[in-house]
């Protein structure tokens, strides 16, 4: 495909899929003019344009990426694409390169972003999932939030939809770029966690050089003997439990019940550790003012967890 001069999507009210598609395409083709129209001449394939979420056809060679036709494009597993999924499918790798994701991480980040970010948008746009399935958080799902930036129903000014789209685009871009940055960082973190697991050996304590995502690497490593994670923060040290799974809050081991909600002198008295500063009521994190203090707390928590009938 030649470099397009125009990026064409439909006019009127917008949804998350063409808005997020525009994030990808405007980054890759910054000199192309973004047009929102339903004019038949503009939504007809031509070598100078990419057309998406309009046009009633899907042909990447023609630069046409719609999903509203009678026989819509499906993923290999039969789940439907939205225009965002189609654009990501064909332009995602180039977008990641434009975001300076290393080639060694390209495929991993591409797949992770597709699964955790693109696919939910595809499914919601096609009605395959209902935002209401998120319960109280349904109004805070990304597609709903982005579409909340549309004009109110009684704003009838001719430019209202285009103005709202233009204002929503940088918001959508911020979410996409943050998700890509986090996905790439997660890959870097996994290498650090893997080395820390090796260093820990048979210890129940995993020590990390800083706060970072560690659950995925821990699960993949099979290091089920580890019970707690410690790491330095800006001015103190944290002691974290390890969740059994991504969903829910159940942990391999909780911090002692006697510590729950305590701070400073009360926490020092209950634990017997000078420098103990805070233990969350949920017993999944505690804070101490030094490495020695946080290690002492960790060892006490391990002893409590290993009492017969506890683990």
Image: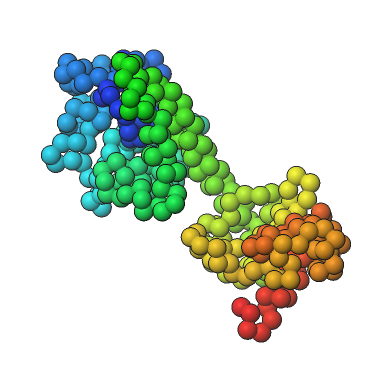
Toward the front, the furthest residue is 154
Q: Where 161 sits versus 268, above or below?
A: above
Q: Position of residue 67 (x, y in %)?
A: 22, 36
Q: Residue at x 74, y 71 (%)?
A: 258
Residue nearer the viewer, 105 or 19 = 19
Q: Position of residue 262 (x, y in %)?
A: 76, 62
Q: Position of residue 146 (x, y in %)?
A: 41, 34
Q: Inspect this view and state whether residue 143 appears.
A: yes
Image quarter of residue 53:
top left
Toward the bottom, the furthest residue is 308
Image quarter of residue 43:
top left
Q: Inspect this view and state whether residue 28 appears.
A: no
Residue nearer the viewer, 80 or 50 = 80
Q: Where 234 sits versus 157, above or below?
A: below
Residue nearer the viewer, 138 or 70 = 138
Q: Residue at x 39, y 23 (%)?
A: 164
The quarter of the picture where the N terminus appears is top left
Q: Position of residue 245 (x, y in %)?
A: 50, 63
Compared across the picture, whether 18 is left or right of 280 comes to left
Q: Residue at x 59, y 48 (%)?
A: 189
The quarter of the picture where the C terminus appears is bottom right
Q: Residue at x 25, y 52 (%)?
A: 77
Q: Where 250 sits versus 182, above or below?
A: below
Toward the left, the furthest residue is 70
Residue nearer the viewer, 47 or 68 = 68
């Amino acid at each position: 495909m030649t470099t397009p001069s125009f990026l064409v999507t439909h006019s009127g009210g917008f949804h998350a899929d063409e808005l997020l598609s525009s994030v990808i395409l405007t980054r890759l083709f910054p000199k192309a003019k973004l047009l929102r129209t339903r004019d038949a001449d503009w939504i007809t394939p031509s070598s100078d344009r990419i057309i998406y979420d309009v046009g009633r056809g899907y042909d990447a060679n023609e630069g046409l990426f719609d999903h509203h036709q009678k026989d819509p494009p499906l993923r290999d597993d039969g789940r439907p694409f939205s225009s965002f999924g189609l654009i990501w499918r064909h332009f995602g790798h180039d977008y990641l390169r434009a975001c300076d994701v290393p080639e060694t991480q390209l495929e991993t980040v591409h797949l992770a972003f597709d699964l955790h970010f693109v696919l939910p948008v595809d499914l919601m746009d096609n009605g395959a999932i209902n935002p209401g399935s998120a319960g109280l958080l349904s109004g805070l799902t990304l597609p709903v939030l982005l579409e909340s930036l549309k004009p109110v129903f009684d704003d009838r000014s001719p430019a209202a939809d285009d103005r709202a789209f233009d204002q929503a685009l940088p918001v959508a871009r911020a979410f996409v770029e943050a998700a890509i940055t986090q996905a790439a960082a997660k890959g870097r973190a996994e290498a650090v966690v893997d080395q820390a697991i090796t260093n820990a050996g048979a210890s129940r304590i995993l020590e990390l050089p800083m706060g970072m995502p560690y659950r995925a690497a821990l699960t993949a490593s099979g290091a089920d003997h580890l019970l707690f994670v410690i790491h330095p923060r800006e001015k103190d040290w944290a002691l974290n439990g390890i969740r059994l799974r991504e969903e829910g809050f159940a942990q391999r081991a909780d911090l002692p019940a006697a510590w729950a909600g305590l701070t400073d002198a009360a926490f020092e008295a209950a634990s017997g550790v000078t420098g103990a500063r805070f233990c969350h009521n949920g017993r999944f994190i505690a804070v101490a003012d030094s490495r020695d203090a946080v290690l002492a707390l960790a060892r006490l928590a391990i002893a409590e967890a290993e009492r017969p009938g506890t683990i």
